[in-house]
Image (spheres, helix red, strand yellow):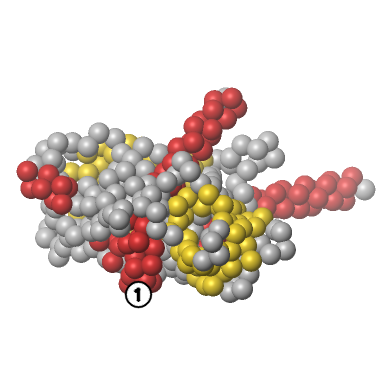
Amino acid sequence: MRLIAAIAAFYLLMLGTPAALAHHGNSAYDEKNPITLKGTVTEFDFVNPHSQIYLDVKDDKGNVVHWAIESQSPGIMVKNDWTRHTLKPGDEITITLIPAKNGSPVGFSGASIGKVVLPDGKVMTMQKR
Amino acid sequence: MPIRRIAMVLVLVSCVGGASVLLGQTGEKSGESSAGKAAPAPKRDLSGVWIMKNGPGGEGPGGEMPPMTPWAQAKYDANKPGYGPKAAPGGNDPILQCDPTGMPRILFFITPFEFATIRGRTVQFFERDHAWREIWTDGRKLPDDPDPSWYGYAIGRWEGDYTFVVDSKGFNDKTWLGAQGQPHSEDMTMQERYHRVDYNTIELNITINDPTAYTKTWNVALRILKREPHTEIPQYYCVWSEENAFTQRIRTPAAAPKK
């Protein structure tokens, strides 16, 4: 019985991941190729429908690219120990996201692929529901 | 003296018995016995915060979609989801402009709801839309011709001690049945059967009848609701200004065709 439950749980977990990504418009983001960016937070919106992190990232030529990154709703973020104070303008962070397929500086950092490393080195994720 | 001793034992036994009754009645536990199995379902009681687990249909009704009428097919083709497998740039999903999510779609949402009982009603209080859906339990019949509304008109009754049956009608046709854009008409009637399996689990069966949209009854695939202990429904409203800002700053740039 326990084995069946474990298999069922594994199956449901696998179902859960693509559904969460699909919720965010899988036609827009390149979910097979996550990237990691290092930059400075300019804005952190802890709101519905999705929290948003706005990030200035220097490219290899030294030009600043303004990234707009969506994450999860506050309801999900708080289950992952986020608060509205977790990020603030000026914070230097590293963030893992899946970028827009059309090459615009927009992306999604959440579900099982989302990750942010805070200035003090603490690692934050968003996958608990 | 033996009588005194018997009396002491009786007092002790009743204290222990009373304590275990008290512990059994404090409902906001994890619902698990010490063996790790869920406690049994309470009788005629759905109270608590519940969340639908992922399953067939995802954020919409699963199971085999019956054939659509031409009217419904035209609507389905015109509905462009903003997310999911059918997603298209510039989606026209009504919830993207904060129209009420409606029934049964709100049940499939990724946020929880709470069952509560008040005078003459069982209420579902949904995090999504901060919406309050009344299910009348005072024995009334469904009205013959209710004004169409976003969440319809519902009555509920118990079948046995563990299944709560809800019959509803009177829905406007402005909502989608699910995130994939399935349409319905004002003629839709619906039955939901909430079967409490154990303390933490409800099996939900939904049946949709809508001859204007579908040529047969839609027996929606079974879905599971799990109880979320120690959860309070957050204050969440769909806010047009926030949705619009999100669309302008994230959705539209992400979905724009490649230059």
Q: Chain of mark 1?
A: B
Whether residue B104 is visible: no
Tell me the residue at 15%/47% (across/down).
Answer: B77
From the viewer's side, name the closer residue of A74 and B26: A74
- Residue furthest out toward the front: A61
Tell me the residue at 63%/43% (across/down).
Answer: B32
Residue B140 left/right relative to B215? right
State which quarter of the image contains the N terminus of chain A: top right
Question: What residue would you read off at disc 1?
Answer: B241
Residue B181, percent from left and from top: 24, 49
From the viewer's side, name the closer residue of B97 and B248: B248
Tell me the residue at 71%/59% (across/down).
Answer: A121
Residue B228, percent from left and from top: 54, 52
From the viewer's side, name the closer residue of A5 and B25: A5
Residue B151, percent from left and from top: 26, 61
- The three-letter code of the residue at mark 1 reads Ser
Whether residue B220 is visible: yes
Residue B159 left/right relative to B27? left
From the viewer's side, name the closer residue of B53 and B196: B53
SS state under label 1: helix
- Residue furthest out toward the right: B1
Q: How many marks?
A: 1
Residue A87, percent from left and from top: 60, 68
Tell me the residue at 37%/43% (across/down).
Answer: B58
Instruction: Report crowding for label 1: few under 14, some 14 to 19, many 20 or more residues within 10 A (C-alpha).
Output: few
Residue A22 left/right relative to A127? left
Residue A44 left/right relative to B13? left
